[in-house]
Image (cartoon, rainbow, N blue to C red):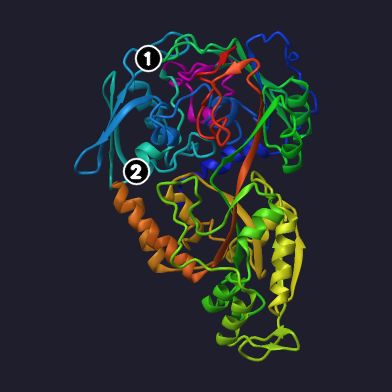
Amino acid sequence: MNRMPVNRRAALKTLLAGSAAPFVIRSAAFAASCDGVVRVGAIAAPDTLNPFATWGSYWPTGYTYDFLVGVDAQRHPDRKGFAKEWTVADDQLTWTFKIWPGMKWSDSQPATARDAAFTYNYLKGSIGQPDELNVGWNNTGGLENIASITALDDETLQIVTKAPTRWPVDNWIMMVPEHVWKDISYAQARSTFHNNAPLVGTGPMIVAEFQQGQFARLTPNKYFRTGQPATAEMIFNVFNTADPIAQGLKSGSLNYGLSLTAAQWADLSKDPDIVVGQSRVEQTDFLAFNTASGKGAGSTKALQDAAFRDAIGYAIDQNALVERAYRGHADPGVGLIPPVAADYYSDLSDIRRHFDLAEAGRKLDAAGYRESNGVRQDKEGKSFQLELITSGNESGNLPIPLAAVQLIAAWLGQIGIPVSVTQLDSGALGARVGSPAKGGGGWDLYVGSRWLSPFPSLLLTLGSAKSARDTSYWASDKFDELLSQIERTVDLKKSQELVDQAVRLIYTEAPYLMLAYPFVLEARRRNDCFVGWGPDDEMVSMSSYFPFDRLKPV
């Protein structure tokens, strides 16, 4: 499991990581007459067009390359990838994918099941080699559980797994053309091969020009399987702050922008020429307890006590956090699975805690943590103060408002638990919350975030002691066994039951308290030049090239 890539975190790095891009839009200004060129702005830092060598270039390469299936194809029947349809046999090991008949690469060469088989086997063949392809978006994670990948004919791909798993439909590997990549060595693919524009893909928009730190220019794929997109071109502008994005939307030099701040979003919402939106994503913002009992332990054993952690849960008002800290741009936190993963999300209404400071105090008393002179004491009668560490802006994640940390510290102070806040840069924070075996730990509370792939087997790894993502150091054999069963389950209903058990277990034990599920804030010009945008809760997909395959100039 630990080999599986954190794909959504990579996508987020693309969205929000800093770059050296200056605050200017280098593409031609938006034409008042509507020239058919769709112009996009985002905080991004694409560094190469080679998907085997980087995590940072999902945008723009995600507009050119298809996933075999991917998350959007499973959520939306009109957003299929390289495969038109798929089935799994009764043995739950043999998956069959039907590739679009007659599909072509953007250079007019046939795009077939043989290209998909090549892509997967190219990666699989590198496992264990000195130059294993494990450093980029297209990587070997999960392929160790695959027995074989075979093109039965041009339109039929067969994947046989060693044990039941949904990896064949859930993986995020971009399909690449065999005729372009077959002579590229593993050493080149993971480092020196730049895959320069123009790219060759089956997606709707083909990267034709790339200027690192500035923009990517994409042209419509005339061989796209549902027809050549109607836009003339697409310019994807990259920035290192949201200021030029907001300015570009106001001036009309951008048609669409994301990575906006709450203040910019509120300001743009007042402009009659602009439509604002917000999209649910897989990020979870949380309060973690240091549950370690040995090396790396926190300042008090109370942190290791589930009854103590549960009591703290009654002192956190997620609704107030959303309204006061996130300014309404988030869902209140509940369990490890965010609402965007709708097949697996539960509001846990039957066991959900409610905000009640008095109840939190009563539960602390009952657990043996009584107050003396306004400060709680541990079971040995010693007063304690907790250190809360945070960054607020972890690399590659949507920022956590400082007001959220301040509210948490204030609420805990009201129940007799003084909290000191230490704000660290992303690198220092990563070291502090790392494995105690590698020098991490020694903190008490941690307000942080994770943005993982939208599949439960990855979203739940935050609670697995076998995963490097378990920053609370919590360990539960029962939880790990549930996670192992989820990874080996294909049937959706059975998977949902197992996920629910795991979510309830970790909610009750409370090594984490989920604070909020933040939204990506976006905006577009009102339909003055293009039609076909998505609804206000998903103008642009974070998981595919929608709607750039179907935008039409007015």
User: Is 43 within the magenta?
Assistant: no
On the image, the x and y values in percent for residue 234 come to 62, 17
Count of marks placed on residues: 2
Q: Which residue is drawn at 66% across and 23% down?
A: 526
In the displayed structure image, the side of residue 111 where residue 22 appears, left or right: right
Mark 1 or 2, nearer chain start: 1
Q: What element carries label 1?
A: loop
Location of residue 195 with respect to 398 vertically, above or below: above
Which residue reaches farthest left? 90
Q: Residue at x 37, y 14 (%)?
A: 103
Under circle 2, the secondary element is loop
Relative to residue 461, is residue 550 depicted above or below?
A: above
Q: What stretch is highlighted in magenta?
A: 179-205
Dividing the picture into quarters, in which one does residue 61 lie? Answer: top right
Q: Tell me what residue is drawn at x 58 percent, y 70 percent.
A: 313
Look at label 1 and name its amino acid.
Answer: Met
Q: Quadrant of the C terminus?
A: top right
Left/right placement of residue 501 relative to residue 90 reads: right
Is residue 132 visible in the rendered structure shown here? Answer: yes
Q: Name the residue under label 1.
A: 103
Q: Is residue 191 visible?
A: no
Specify the farthest residue to the bottom. Answer: 381
Disc 2: which residue: 166
Q: Say few, some or many: other residues with alpha carbon within 10 Å of mark 2 (under 14 / 14 to 19 / 20 or more).
A: many
